[in-house]
Image (cartoon, grey):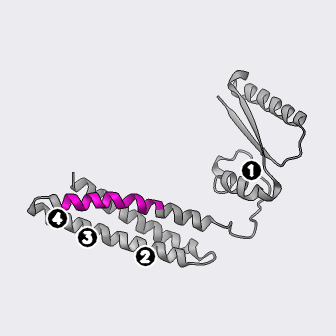
Amino acid sequence: MPHVIIKMHPGRTEEQKKCLAETVTKDVMEILLCEEKTVSVAIEEVESAEWAEKVYRPDILGKEDRLYKKPGYNPFEGQEPPGLKDVYIQRLQTQFDEWKPEIERLKVKAELAAAEAKSEYRKLLDDLQGKQKTARAKLDELRQSSGGAWEDLKTGIEGAWKEVEKALKAAVSKFK
């Protein structure tokens, strides 16, 4: 059931939009060998001044592997797209937030464990929290970086993140 969304600047007539939708529908039916009733076409009008933020950034930027027809323009040409660093930081922060309750559950399990297991659990938790502290420091360093310098920090951050994930998996498997 193909659904095609066309985003374009305003100013086209209803007749032009209907003609476009009909042509796209026919092409989809012919190429994908499907019935007309399974095809839908939507047209969204986006003002020129909003195009970069409402279309280019969410639908094109960073999704080149999914674009079968790439645009011949880039509104961010010669500059880092504003906000890319913020999106990356937000993704990392979200992961941190997801780890918190899981680590708290592990702490509770460690406290409830038998005396001989407590020591081993404590070591695992200390290792995990040390790696988490390192990752947090790298995230803070990333937040403080300026310009394109944050790109240079990504490798170290991603390595620290993998270490936390590895330590968390190890602790979770031991606590079962």
Segment tinted magenta in the rendering: 94-110
* Residue 137: numbered disc: 2
Q: Can you say whether 109 is above or below 15 in the image? A: below
Q: Earlier in the sequence, mark 2 or mark 1?
A: 1
Q: Nearer the viewer, residue 35 or 47?
A: 47
Q: Can you say whether 98 is above or below 20 in the image? A: below
| Residue 43: percent from left, percent from top | 77, 39
Give the amino acid at mark 4.
Answer: Glu
Q: Residues within 10 Å of mark 4 (few under 14, many from 20)?
A: some
Q: How far apart are the alpha carbons under marks 1 and 3?
A: 49 Å
Asked whether disc 2 touches disc 1, contact meaning CB atoms under 8 Å apart, the reply is: no
Q: How far apart are the alpha carbons under marks 3 and 2?
A: 16 Å
| Residue 88: percent from left, percent from top | 55, 64
Q: Can you say whether 102 is above or below 35 in the image? A: below
Q: Quadrant of residue 95?
A: bottom left
| Residue 148: percent from left, percent from top | 62, 75
Q: Main secondary structure of the magenta part?
A: helix
Residue under circle 4?
120
Q: Residues within 10 Å of mark 2 (few under 14, many from 20)?
A: some
Asked whether disc 4 touches disc 1, contact meaning CB atoms under 8 Å apart, the reply is: no
* Residue 126: numbered disc: 3
Q: Is residue 34 visible?
A: no
Q: Residue shown at 68%/24% (left/top)?
A: 38
Give the amino acid at mark 2.
Answer: Ala
Q: Residues within 10 Å of mark 3 (few under 14, many from 20)?
A: few
